[in-house]
């Protein structure tokens, strides 16, 4: 069962890459003001801060889409990326690291991101086998435990680690003065999230971090989700309500001692079926919640 | 467990000490010490020369691409390799250009990473020059706050703030960061409590087993507790305790000032700090005045090793400890 779950989760990263390679429309961008832009494309949403001190980038999507994204960053910023932060290690967020590093970007991430990219800590992927290590140029050069602040482009950019949630190496990035928060994959706006139990993620931890984030932000905070459209605090509230309800619904079966098969057959997530999407259909998310709660 | 916790707490409480020293410490810092609160500022017998434009004079190759550079101001640490030039501290504004030129020659490239152990201008005075040359400057959050003036220093002779934009650290941290460069893990560790200042960091080259102490340690000298920049004597005890925790028997230590040191040197300094604090505390508890305390020479047993150089003599160190304990 656990193997099935991890393989489904790993499929998010593994299967999406060829798709990205096949079709490369120029990525869409949104200007959030204060020199901050979001690049939407395949994979996770990219945040960019531009200004006199150089381009600062959050995540870089897939290896295959990296050249297009790099070109887009350069066009937005008028120069090469100087600093890059990975919100976590997944290939749809950090897959372009080597390309960006070769272009001169200094890569920052939580220490567990580096451990997973080097292979020092196994990340269970397809068939429960460890994912292969990334090439050395893709490894973050500067790692942290709790976080770092950047003082750039007339902004304070606060990178902070959160406890085990989507993976065990998640960070969020807060542009303090313009009040814009990139949540990494702690926010899949309007769709079921990936909770990567094979990379140290935690179902209850994920909900806890979402709630902590909700308590920290205000009604004016602009949220850049890891996946999905730009959001507000109200959108985050809906996502939290979904996750809280879904956890309670599945936990009932876990507590009762139901098997995974029986739980799936009961369709406890039916009330939230509109959150299903290509990589995380209802059945997959039910399985993740079941395995995560059973631990 | 409880006993262990209690004893380490009382250790913190009872035995704080500091070891400043500095044959080449900034004269302004010397002149400014101690801050207004301290009654009798001891004067250095022979003030060090004013900083000039000379580059560091000595290069000590420690292996693994790591070098210790000695000249005026604080000792520099340098890592050279395929991934770029990494530098610890940059001495004075007056000799920054010369240091930069000499480092470029040594390292065959400009410094890419620069980390400040603290904000003093005999360590971070060259930031503007190195920042303009392209180095990304790292430091603890309080270093930046001191350099911008957000947290004003009350030390007399403290440099004008705000420092120029290029002199300000671009990346700041609270507890530390790791660099993975030139085949090394380079671990910047924030001192657990304010010691020399409230923004001290020491830097450990893990595989090479070399630690740059910043000014939490100056070889065989009583410490300079810059109370005007938030420094505390208790912080020196926790800093050196932490340094001994993260390092091993064969570690080589680059002091903020002075020659390369060994574990025995650090242990001796820690013992001195603890002992000095306990000795002064006994007098405070006995109700002695500052004058009586200083006159009774409670640090006499450590002075042969720690009171023979620098600008903090035993009376000055006694005074700092006394005042901290009376707070």
Image: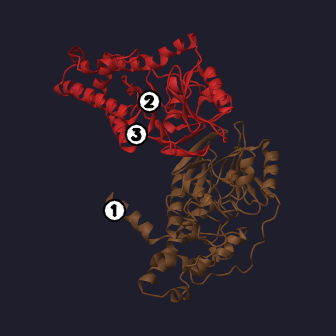
Chain colours: A red, B brown
Q: Chain of mark 1?
A: B
Residue sitting nearer the eye, B172 or B147: B147
Residue sitting nearer the eye, A164 or B37: B37
Q: Are marks 2 and 1 in contact (CB under 8 Å)?
A: no
Q: Residue at x 71, y 59 (%)?
A: B125
Image quarter of the C terminus of chain B:
bottom left
- Element at label 3: loop
How many numbered dots are placed on residues in this image? 3
Q: Residue at x 45, y 36 (%)?
A: A222
Q: Chain of mark 3?
A: A
Image quarter of the N terminus of chain B:
bottom left
Disc number at residue A163? 3
Q: Is residue B45 visible?
A: yes
Residue at image mark 1: B3
- Mark 2 or 3: in front is 2
Tell me, yes or no, whether dots 2 and 1 are on the same chain: no
- Mark 2 or 1: in front is 2
Residue at image mark 2: A185
Disc 3/disc 1 C-alpha distance (Å): 30 Å
- Element at label 1: helix
Q: Is residue B289 left or right of residue A140?
A: left
Q: Position of residue B188 (x, y in %)?
A: 58, 50
The image quarter in which residue A239 lies: top left
Residue sitting nearer the eye, A160 or B74: A160
């Amino acid at each position: 069962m656990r193997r099935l779950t991890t393989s489904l989760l790993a499929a998010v990263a593994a299967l999406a890459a060829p798709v990205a390679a096949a079709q490369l429309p120029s990525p869409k961008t949104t200007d959030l003001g204060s020199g901050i832009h979001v690049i939407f494309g395949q994979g996770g949403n990219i945040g960019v801060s531009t200004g006199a001190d150089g381009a600062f980038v959050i995540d870089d999507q897939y290896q295959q889409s990296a050249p297009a994204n790099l070109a887009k960053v350069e066009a937005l910023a008028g120069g090469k990326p100087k600093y890059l932060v990975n919100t976590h290690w997944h290939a749809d967020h950090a897959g372009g690291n080597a390309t960006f590093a070769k272009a001169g970007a200094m890569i920052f991430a939580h220490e567990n991101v580096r451990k997973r990219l080097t292979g020092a800590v196994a990340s269970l992927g397809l068939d429960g086998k460890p994912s292969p290590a990334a090439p050395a140029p893709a490894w973050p050069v500067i790692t942290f435990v709790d976080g770092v602040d950047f003082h750039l482009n007339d902004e304070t950019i606060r990178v902070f680690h959160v406890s085990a949630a989507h993976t065990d190496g998640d960070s969020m990035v807060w542009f303090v003065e313009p009040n814009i928060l990139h949540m990494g994959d702690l926010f899949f706006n309007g769709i079921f999230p990936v909770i990567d139990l094979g990379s140290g993620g935690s179902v209850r931890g994920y909900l806890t971090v979402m709630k902590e984030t909700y308590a920290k932000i205000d009604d004016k905070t602009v949220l850049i989700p890891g996946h999905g459209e730009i959001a507000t605090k109200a959108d985050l509230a809906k996502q939290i309500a979904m996750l809280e309800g879904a956890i309670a619904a599945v936990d009932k079966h876990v507590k009762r001692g139901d098997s995974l098969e029986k739980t799936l057959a009961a369709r406890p997530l039916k009330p939230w079926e509109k959150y299903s999407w290509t990589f995380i259909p209802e059945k997959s998310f039910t399985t993740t919640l079941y395995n995560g709660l059973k631990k | 467990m409880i006993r262990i916790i209690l004893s380490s707490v009382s250790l913190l409480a009872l035995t704080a000490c500091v070891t400043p020293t500095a044959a080449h410490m900034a004269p302004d810092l010397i002149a400014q010490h101690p801050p207004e609160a301290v009654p009798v500022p001891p004067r250095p017998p022979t003030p060090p020369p004013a900083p000039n434009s000379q580059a560091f004079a000595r290069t000590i190759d420690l292996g693994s691409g790591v070098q210790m550079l000695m000249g005026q101001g604080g000792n520099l640490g340098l890592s050279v390799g395929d991934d770029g030039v990494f530098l610890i501290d940059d001495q004075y504004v007056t000799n920054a250009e010369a240091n930069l030129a000499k480092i470029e020659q040594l390292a065959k490239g400009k410094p890419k990473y620069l980390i400040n152990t603290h904000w003093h201008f005999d360590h971070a005075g060259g930031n503007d020059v190195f920042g303009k040359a392209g180095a990304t400057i790292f430091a603890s959050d309080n270093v930046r706050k001191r350099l911008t003036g957000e947290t004003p220093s009350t030390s007399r002779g403290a440099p004008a703030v705000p420092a120029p934009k290029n002199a300000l650290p671009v990346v700041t941290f609270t507890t530390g960061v790791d660099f993975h460069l030139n085949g090394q893990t380079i671990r910047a560790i924030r001192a657990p409590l304010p010691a020399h200042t409230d923004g001290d960091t020491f830097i450990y080259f893990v595989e090479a087993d070399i630690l740059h102490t910043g000014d939490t340690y100056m070889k065989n000298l009583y410490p300079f507790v810059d109370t005007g920049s938030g420094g505390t004597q208790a912080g020196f005890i926790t800093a050196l305790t932490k340094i001994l925790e993260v390092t091993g028997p064969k570690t080589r230590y680059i002091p903020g000032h002075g020659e390369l040191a060994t574990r025995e040197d650090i242990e001796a300094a820690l013992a001195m700090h603890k002992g000095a604090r306990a000795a002064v505390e006994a007098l405070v508890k006995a109700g002695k005045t500052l004058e009586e305390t200083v006159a009774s020479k409670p640090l006499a047993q450590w002075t042969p090793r720690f009171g023979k150089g620098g600008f903090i003599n035993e009376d000055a160190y006694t005074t700092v400890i006394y005042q901290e304990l009376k707070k």
